[in-house]
Image: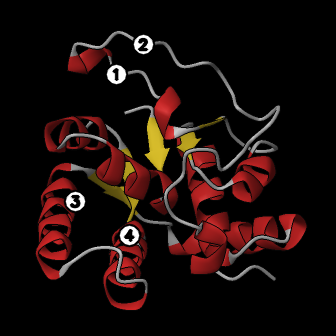
Amino acid sequence: MRYLFDASSMFEVIKSCEEEESLRLLSENCILDLTKYEVGNAFWKEHVLHKTIGADEFKELLNLLRTIILRTKVLSVDAHKLPDVAQVAENERITFYDASYVTTAKLQNLTLVTEDAHLAKAASKYARTALAKDVPRETLGKPEQASGDRTDSPTNEGSTHDWSATRERS
């Protein structure tokens, strides 16, 4: 397990990949305990608020999310590390949620996978970052190499969800 997927990248993988590819890619890596709520909320918004997915697709996505979570290593921020999270949030002017991803990636020596350009820029000071499309998929029979850190020009290109609208920034 080399990668920590934040909600934006988990959402992107689930929405853009075949079910089996999503399961393999995410189950071989990590998420935070809060990620399932953020992704579930994004699906709920698409269904209820934006009406971009119907009830059947919403249920299918939630079932896939449940299956992925049951197979994925779910990490939590140790209570003793909350001051570190707060310091990152304050220093980088990012949400406490986002700072928890950054802190965990740093402490666990994981690459933070995010589609959120603002978070990627802040995180690059503490850990490696990548887009979901740059995570190697050699275990899927598609040998691709990660293009390295994406800290030089993070973008939201290709993202199907506006994460800045999901989580308010200060």
Q: Position of residue 22 (x, y in %)?
A: 25, 42
Q: Where is residue 28 in the image (x, y as percent from the top left)?
A: 27, 36
Which of the marked residues, 3 or 4, is nearer the chain's N terminus?
Answer: 4
Tell how many labels.
4
Which is more toward the observer, 19 or 66? 19
Query: Dot 3, how many residues are within 10 Å of its Cα: few (below 14), some (14-19), or many (20+)?
Result: some
CA distance separating discs 1 and 2 = 6 Å
Which of the marked residues, 4 or 2, is nearer the chain's N terminus?
Answer: 4
CA distance separating discs 4 and 2 = 26 Å
CA distance separating discs 3 and 4 = 11 Å
- Residue linked to disc 3: 69
Marks 4 and 2 close (CB-CB < 8 Å): no
Which is more toward the observer, 108 or 121? 121
Quadrant where the N terminus is found in the figure = top left
Q: Residue 144 carries which label?
A: 2
- Residue linked to disc 4: 39
Q: Residue 137 carries which label?
A: 1
Q: What element carries label 2?
A: loop
Vertical comparison of 138 with 23: above or below? above
Which of the marked residues, 1 or 2, is nearer the chain's N terminus?
Answer: 1
CA distance separating discs 4 and 1 = 22 Å
Mark 1 vs mark 3: give the one in front.
Answer: 1
Q: Which amino acid does label 1 sit on?
A: Arg
Vertical comparison of 156 with 77: above or below? above
Vertical comparison of 76 with 59: above or below? above
Which of the marked residues, 2 or 3, is nearer the chain's N terminus?
Answer: 3
What residue is drawn where x is 54% and y is 52%? 159
What residue is drawn where x is 21% and y is 40%? 18
Q: What residue type is labelled 4?
A: Val
- Side of 129 where 77 appears, left or right: left
